[in-house]
Amino acid sequence: MQFHGTAKVNQKGHLEIGSVDTIKLAEEFGTPLYVYDVALIRERARSFKETFETLGVNAQVAYASKAFSTVAMVQLAAEEGLSLDVVSGGELYTALAAGFPAGKIHFHGNNKSLQELDMAIEAGIGCVVVDNFDELEMLVELCSSTGKSVNVLLRVTPGIEAHTHDYILTGQEDSKFGFGLENGQADKALLEAMNSGSVRLLGLHCHIGSQIFETTGFLLAARKIYAKLNEWKKLYGFEPKVLNLGGGFGIRYTEEDNPIPASRYVVAIIEEVREQADQYGMVVPEIWIEPGRSLVGDAGTTLYRTGSRKEVPDIRQYLAVDGGMSDNIRPALYQAKYEAVLAGRVLAKPEETVAIAGKCCESGDMLIWDIPLPKAEKADILAVFCTGAYGYSMANNYNRIPRPAVVFVENGEAKLVVKRETFEDMVRLDLPLKERVKSK
Ligand SMILES: Cc1ncc(COP(=O)(O)O)c(C=O)c1O
Ligand SMILES: N[C@@H](CCCC[NH3+])C(=O)O
């Protein structure tokens, strides 16, 4: 088992993260519990930034907050000098509530509402990544009616199939995102933005997908974009100030995954952009990237308490935990795989193979199929690794299960950053059909 970040086994044989015993965390904060290794997030952020600095490229590393958005996380991103990618009014609100500098926020989304765009312009955000013609029209109208202007990038779809799960592909031509680069849409959008007289066109954006292990797709996207930029330079004298090549850098969930270090994607992208810009006699633009998973994915661990068992004779042993698809929908949605240990007996020898079941009323609510573990007692603590990205952010209240708390650990200290939801929260927004009749 390969641990991530500061995770290690302490003298008691317990899993420790950020020099804090996870068994103690489970006792103090309850389970399920998301635990984040803050030092690892800082290390990842610094590595991206240092790579750009070493390469001497003007850059922005924007944390894709859809991976895990909370006030504390956004503040941590600000502390590390990151920019921020938000994708909805809710994520934008979170960023502003956290005091994140508005000028470093980039606003994404394929169906931004007028209210969301208004909120973004009012806040003075750094840039809107325009996804489609309706949005461009709304923005131009908003700018004219308010007398304000806004920086924009045009999101283009380069027609590339990255090698990843179908549901997290975004660069293929048949996608709900962006202007097609090769079907004339991007050309039309460019002219509309350039001639709008209101929005300030900074450049282009492209995101080909998520959990990608190769640099090939990014390089291909850069080449396709530059071929188009060359046309635009000749036809309209347009050269981008900014090129945003998105996120999507893959991480190691299990031993089946072999990611390259995140810095290698950056080096490869920069080499390609420099070559392309040189070939067409253009200035290398500012390069922006938007990592989400690769900043927070392996920094998150979920602690569960084990519960009931069911044996299907000669077939399988089910071991249920006190969470499931309500706090981690990724196995059900993408057949995602995870590794786990019993946090109180990490070094004990595996004695049985069990299937870790969630507590939701769905047969597909399985967190891990068939993992070898030491014999789990009732109420043992199971730690599932690499749940930091798209775990809490995709959590839900299916079966009216309250969402878990979130704790940040660093240098021996644990800080609660999101409170656990309660049963009262489950009915907080409900309105009665009739006033409650007191039971006798
Ligand atoms: C536009 C955009 N940028 C950035 C990201 C972050 O991706 P990841 O978490 O894989 O780095 C996503 C999600 O795939 C995205 O849609
Ligand atoms: N939610 C996805 C990735 C999101 C992609 C966002 N464009 C995952 O868990 O892998």
Image (cartoon, grey):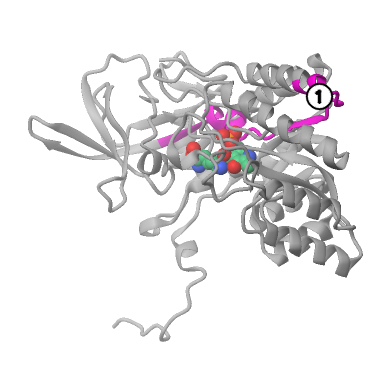
Residue 21 seen? yes
Give the SS element for disc 1: loop
Instruction: Using the rendered view, name the quadrant where residue 2 is placed.
Output: top left
Residue drawn 84% across the image and 26% down it: 58
**Residue 264 in the figure: left or right of residue 20:** right
Circle 1: is it few (<14), some (14-19), or many (20+) Cα within 10 Å?
some
Q: Nearer the viewer, residue 339 or 244?
A: 244
Q: Label 1 sits on what residue type?
A: Tyr
Horizontal relation, residue 33 to residue 291: left or right: left
Would residue 434 appear left or right of 137 to someone viewing this image? left
**Relative to the observer, which residue lies in front, 292 or 145?**
145
**Residue matched to label 1:** 280
Q: Is residue 63 above or below residue 270?
A: below
The residue range painted magenta reads 276-303
- Viewer can see residue 128: no
Q: Residue at x 52, y 22 (%)?
A: 213
Q: Quadrant of residue 347?
A: top left
Q: Residue furthest left?
A: 313
User: The C terminus appears in which quarter of the rendering?
Assistant: bottom left
Expressed as whole percent of the image width and height from the top left, the position of residue 64 reads 65, 39
**Is residue 21 located in the magenta-colored stretch of the structure?**
no
Percent across and percent down for residue 150 are 85, 53
